[in-house]
Image (cartoon, rainbow, N blue to C red):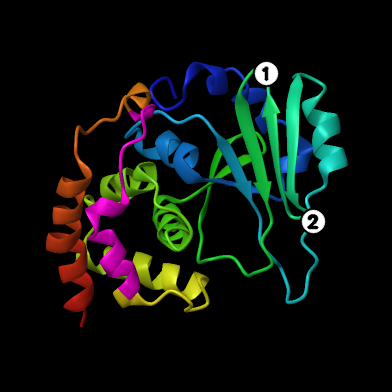
Amino acid sequence: MDKSLVDKTKKVIESISKMESIKPYILVGGTALSLQLSSRMSEDLDFMRWQQYHGEKMDVDIKSITKEVELGHVIDKINILDNNQVEFFIDGGVKLSFYAPERKAPQINKVHFLNNLYLADIDTIASLKMETMQRRNSFRDYYDLYCILKEKTNEEIIRIIDNSLKYSDHLMKSKNLLGKLGNYERFTKDEDFKQLEPKYDISSREIAEFMDLKVKTAYKNRQ
């Protein structure tokens, strides 16, 4: 964990992991990946849960989460983006986000990490990051996908892409996704990225070349 989290997040993760209110949630995103792959440091704690049945109302229990967080931390700010999406900023800059979309979960395998804290498995994190590309162009996501996919077989890459397309309810098409993965101009490094001590010093252009050479080829040549 020493090379997975920035100091401010490292200080809070154990107490957050003991909260009862995180039990329905799974940690996703860059931090869940860094804790398993150690490809860069990460800072935000992003939690998600999904519908267990069609029509289930998906609210974030702000009251319960707030009560538990306040037991050991200072809440600097709460952003209520929607009834099912809330951000807590605590202890001078650590962000906890809780998101409960009204959709079924992707194919996912939970990985137990600490106390009540479970992580999404690496392949699922990749699928979620691909689906997120419909809405944002983050170099961190692009870099994370490179770190994941470079270690995968063609068959694993195909499964990851298919899982992402299915999770999007096929609103995202394979042609569009592969096009985005190969378009380096969409992804520029933010100024703070170097502070996360990435394992690989690689540009968006080099990542795009990898995506074209390995990922696109694997998917287009699927059996």
Q: Is residue 192 left or right of residue 68?
A: left
- The secondary structure type at the circle numbered 1 is loop
Label 2 packing within 10 angstroms: few (<14), some (14-19), many (20+):
some
In this view, the residue farthest toward the bottom is 223
What quarter of the picture does the C terminus occupy?
A: bottom left
Q: Is residue 19 magenta?
A: no
Does residue 146 appear in this view? yes
Q: Between marks 1 and 2, how big is the CA–CA gap?
A: 25 Å
Tell me which amino acid carries mark 2: Asp
Task: Find disc 1 in the rendering and name its residue.
Answer: 91
| Of 208 and 38, the residue lying toward us | 208
User: Measured from the top left, where is residue 92 in percent x and y?
Assistant: 64, 17
What quarter of the picture does the N terminus occupy?
A: top left
* Res 102 → quadrant: bottom right
| Of 125 and 83, the residue lying toward us | 83
Label 1 packing within 10 angstroms: few (<14), some (14-19), many (20+):
some
Q: Is residue 189 magenta?
A: yes
In this rendering, the answer to whether 181 lies above or below 163 is above
User: Measured from the top left, where is residue 112 in percent x and y?
Assistant: 55, 42
Residues drawn in magenta: 176-193
* Res 104 → quadrant: bottom right
Tell me which amino acid carries mark 1: Asp
Q: Residue at x 35, y 68 (%)?
A: 161
Task: Find disc 2 in the rendering and name its residue.
Answer: 59
